[in-house]
Amino acid sequence: MPGLLLAVDQGNSNTEFAVFDGADMKGHWRTSTKVETTADEYVVWLSQLTRLQGIDETAIDAAIISSVVPGGLFELRVLCRKHFNADPLVIGEGIDLGIKVLIDEPSEAGADRLANAVGGYVRFGGPLIIVDFGTATNFDIIDADGNFCGGVLAPGISLALDAMHRVSARLPRVGVRRPPTVIGRNTVNSMESGVYWGYVSLIEGTVTRIRGEYGEPMKVVATGGLGPLFDAATDTIDSYDPDVTVRGLLEIYRRNRPDNA
C-alpha cells in the first residue's frame, strides 16, 4: 500500500517541504535555503514539524525534488535516501513532465517554473499567468494545453530592498509592507512606497503587456510568500494559491510513478 510522499521545492531564498497522502496535503512548511544545511539537520527540523501535525514520518516512502540550487541538491537526496528510504525523483533528470517546454533552450527552464506550470494548469486551466514572488519575481506563461511558454523574470522585492540598502550609505534597511500613503513623508515611508507601489505597477503593467502580446484572455494566479500582500492591492491578480509549486510536484510524481500515486 502506498505511503506518504515528500515533495521538496528548493529555491534560492526558501525551501518548501510538503507531505502528501494521495491528493491530501498533510503538511506544508518553509525554511531558509542554506546550502550548508545537512540531511541530518533537515530531518531534525522536519521531524518536529511532522509530529506537531500528527504525521507519521516513518510512513514517508517516496519523494520528489525541484531545486535551482545545485549546491543544495546533494543533501536533499541524502535526506530522502537515508532518513526516508526513498530514492527521489528530481525535476530535470529524465522526468516526464507531461507538458511541452516551448522555449528556445528547454534545459534553461527552472525546475520550480516547470512545477508551477504543471500545478497551475491542473488547478486553474489555461491560458494562465503565474506570478511567483521569490528571489526573483517570475511571470510564468502556460498555454491552453498546459505547455510552458516562457515568461518574464524581474528582481524580487527583497532583492531590490537589499540592493537599495547596500549601495547607499544613508538608506536604511526596511521591510515589505503596504505604506499608509503613496507619498512618503519620511525616508522609510518613501522607500516602502516606492518598492510596494512600484511592484504593484510592475505586476499590472507586465500582465497587461503579456495579455496584449498573447492575444487571448488569461487568468492570473499569484504564489510565493509575498503573494497575499500584493493580491490585496490589485484586481489584476485573480487568485492567490501558496501551494501551486508543490501541487505541481505531486502531479509530476503521479505522471512518473502512477503505480505508487
Image: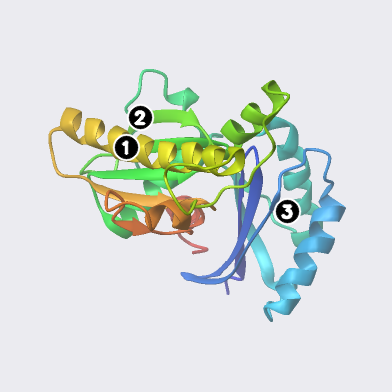
Residue 202: x and y in percent read 37, 35
The amino acid type, in three-letter code, at marker 1 is Ile
| In contact (CB < 8 Å): disc 3 and disc 2 | no
| N-term mark: 3 or 2 | 3
Which residue reaches farthest top?
104
User: Is disc 3 placed on a helix, strand or loop?
Assistant: helix
Of the residues under marks 1 and 3, which one precedes in the sequence? 3
Location of mark 3 (residue)? 80
**In the rendered picture of this protein, how many numbered marks are placed on residues?**
3
Q: Which mark is residue 141?
A: 1
CA gap between label 1 and label 2 equals 6 Å
Do the numbered discs 1 and 3 sit on residues whose CB atoms are within 8 Å?
no
Report whether 8 appears left or right of 107: right
Rendering coords of residue 177 (x, y %): 54, 52
Asked whether the residues under the numbered discs 1 and 2 touch, taking CB atoms below 8 Å apart as contact, a structural biologist would say yes
Residue at the spot x=75%, y=63% of the render? 46
Q: Amino acid at mark 3?
A: Cys
Q: Pointer 3: residues within 10 angstroms few (<14), some, or many (20+)?
A: many
Q: CA distance from mark 1 to mark 3?
A: 31 Å
Q: Which residue is mark 2?
A: 150
| Colour setting | rainbow
Q: Is residue 140 visible?
A: no
Lateral position of residue 71 relative to residue 90, left or right = right
- The mark closer to the camera, 3 or 2, is 2
